[in-house]
Image: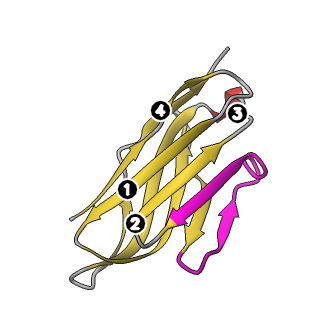
């Protein structure tokens, strides 16, 4: 009932930049948090950045100072600016949102993922 669609992944050289976007749609009553996770094959999915509707943000230590999250809760969109990319940033990046559907049911919703590959 709630869909998240990411875009902006791709191949980039070490030190380069990318900008990921994610738009939420569907029967959304309201969102109170949006964030980005990433996952490498064989490893657990990790939360790397979150933004709340109270204008707070939080980052994993591995990306702090290099990545910036921007949440637009009016337009139900979240961005992740990735700068100074490293080889170890290679992963599938997932958008996630927490909120309420129009029915009042709470939930956490996920996008399909977008591949980010950092390679020379």
Task: Give the extent of the magenta segment.
Answer: 53-71
Residue at x 69%, y 59% (from the top left corner): 59
Residue linked to disc 3? 85
Determine whether label 4 and label 2 are within 8 Å by CB. no
Q: Quadrant of the N terminus?
A: bottom left
Residue linked to disc 2? 76
Which one is earlier in the sequence, the residue at label 2 or at label 1?
Answer: 1
Residue 3 image point, x, y percent: 28, 58
Of labels 2 and 3, the one closer to you: 2
The Cα atoms of the two marked residues, 2 and 1, are separated by 6 Å
Determine whether label 2 and label 3 are within 8 Å by CB. no
Q: Nearer the viewer, residue 55 or 44?
A: 55
Give the numbered dot on residue 23: 1
Label 1 SS: strand
Label 3 SS: loop
| Residue 66 shown left or right of residue 107 in the figure | right
Determine whether label 3 and label 4 are within 8 Å by CB. no
Residue linked to disc 4? 115
Residue 116 image point, x, y percent: 53, 32
């Amino acid at each position: 009932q709630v869909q998240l669609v990411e875009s902006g992944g791709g191949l980039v050289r070490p030190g380069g930049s990318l900008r990921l976007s994610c738009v939420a749609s569907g029967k959304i009553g309201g969102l109170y948090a949006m964030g980005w996770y990433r996952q490498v094959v064989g490893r657990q999915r990790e939360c790397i950045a979150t933004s709340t509707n109270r204008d707070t943000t939080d980052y994993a230590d591995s990306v702090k100072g290099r990545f910036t999250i921007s949440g637009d809760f009016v337009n139900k969109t979240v961005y992740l600016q990735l700068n100074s990319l490293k080889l170890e940033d290679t992963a599938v990046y997932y958008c996630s949102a927490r909120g309420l559907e129009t029915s009042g049911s709470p939930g956490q919703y996920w996008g399909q993922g977008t591949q980010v590959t950092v390679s020379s």
